[in-house]
Each structure stands twice: as structure tokens, then as C-alpha cells.
Amino acid sequence: MAPTKLWLFRDAAALAMPAYEGSLAEVLRHKKMPETAALYLAVAVSEPVARLHACDLLHCDLKPDNYLFQFDHNAESSSRSKNSDAWDEIVEVYGDESLPSVVLADFGRAIDLRRHAASTTFQSNRAHIDDYLWPPAKRAKAAWTHQVDRYALGVVLHLLALGHLPPSSGPTTKLPRGWDPTFWHAAFELLLADDQSTSLEDIYRHARRSLAAALRRDTGGLRRGMASLGDHFRDLKRHLRQHQLQRAQGFS
């Protein structure tokens, strides 16, 4: 995301940014997505949270409404980094014109851990809305730091894979037919069960490797896998723009 203007005041600040075309919430209402599209979005939603945690920042309001989509982007404004792993090689060879840039927005509840002592924890139950709030913080107001973002990210991934919130008894283990469960089951276990033995950076990189493998498994090979993913997002782009036009007409 490239801000266009910044206004600083004594007790407030305002930031102007490009308009985005929709949110992950609208994507999830659109239709069931193929495995490659779900894995692409798993990469997109995991990366910014991993980067925040690496800088000792907590977002504290992860939910589909706060992931914004932009389809008409260029290499300069794209949120995707150009590293030399398997996924970047795929994008380099096959292109990403049809793939959306996804950014994480709304840092109104964010916490900068660098401004607190190293042992500081928090007990507020306002870190996330109920469906995305780490259960111990909801029930007993347990102390937390990174757990709240990790759990909320797990809920977002559960929505991507299965289209519904994880039940109170634990994450659903039955994935759509034909999907490779390796990444999804590992992510659910690590994020929803409060297993902090693996960093978000490792989970994000696991998602990238799984996406590359899923594209190679796709019928017709890698090129067809990328084309299938692009077709899905072109259809989604039309849907989001139609929805945006309908909202604008409703306000006129």
C-alpha cells in the first residue's frame, strides 16, 4: 500500500491511501474457491501478520473486512515481495496480472510492544471482535500478547478453506475433496490450538510452498494451474466491481 498524503496534528493523524476494490469479507461471500485460490489468499493474509510480529507489533483486529483487495496494480505498488523462493519463480515465469494485491488495513487497535517492558502482557477482551478473539481472553480474560493475532489468523484461514468459523469443539479437519491437508491441518493446529512452537514466518513460508505444489498438481501442469487461478480472480474482480457500483448507486 502506497500512501498518497499524510496530515499530522497535535493529537491526531490522517492518512490518505488509494481506494481498494473490495475486502476479503466480500470474497468469502462470493462462492466456493478452488484450492489454489485459497492457498494464494493464505499466503496473502499470513505475510503481513508475520511481518508485524517480526517487528514486535500486534494488529489486534484481524478479520476479513480488514484485508483489502486491489486488482489493477503494478510492480511498484504490489504488496508481494520478490524473493527467490518457489512462489516468486512461478510469478516470474507465468505472470500475475490477474492476481490481486492484498493489504492489511485498520491499525486502530494495534499495539507496539517495543513501547512496553519485555514481560508486558495484556488482558483486554477488546483486541478482536468475539468470533476472532482468542478464547481464553474471552472467557477468563487470560493475559496475552501474540496469541490474539495468531488465533484470529487461524480463524481467517479456516474461513478460506471451509467457508465457516471453526466450531467451539476445535477446527474442522474435513477439507474439500481433493485438497492436500498438509498445510491447512498444520496451520489450524498451530494457530487455533495456541501452539507457538512455529513462528508466523514459517507458517507463511509453508503456505507459499503448498501453493507452488498445488499449482504443479493441477491438471495440465503448472501453466494451467496458474490460468485456473487467474480465471477465478477475474471472475471475482467482476463481482466486486459490480457490488461496488450497486453500493454507489444506492447512495446516489
Image (tube, rainbow, N blue to C red):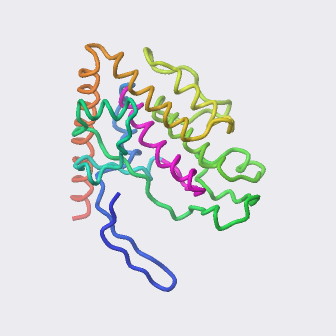
Let me know if residue 54 is in the magenta part: yes
The quadrant of the rendering that contains the N terminus is bottom left
Residue 216 vertical placement versus 187 (above, below): above
The quadrant of the rendering that contains the C terminus is bottom left
Name the chief secondary structure element in magenta.
helix
The quarter of the picture where residue 84 lies is top left
Please give the name of the residue rendered at 27% of the width and 56% of the height, measured from the top-left corner.
Answer: 247
Side (left or right) of 148 relative to 82: right
Let me know if residue 247 is in the magenta part: no
Q: Where is residue 23 in the image (x, y as percent from the top left)?
A: 37, 49
* Residue extending farthest front: 84
What span is in magenta? 36-63
Please give the name of the residue rendered at 73% of the width and 64% of the height, measured from the top-left corner.
Answer: 117
Please give the name of the residue rendered at 65% of the width and 68% of the height, measured from the top-left corner.
Answer: 115
- Depth check, front residue: 29 or 40: 40
Q: Where is residue 89 in the image (x, y as percent from the top left)?
A: 32, 31
Q: Where is residue 38 in the image (x, y as percent from the top left)?
A: 40, 31
Residue 113 vertical placement versus 142 (above, below): below
Please give the name of the residue rendered at 29% of the width and 13% of the height, measured from the top-left corner.
Answer: 219
- Depth check, front residue: 13 or 53: 53
Residue 63 vertical placement versus 117 (above, below): above
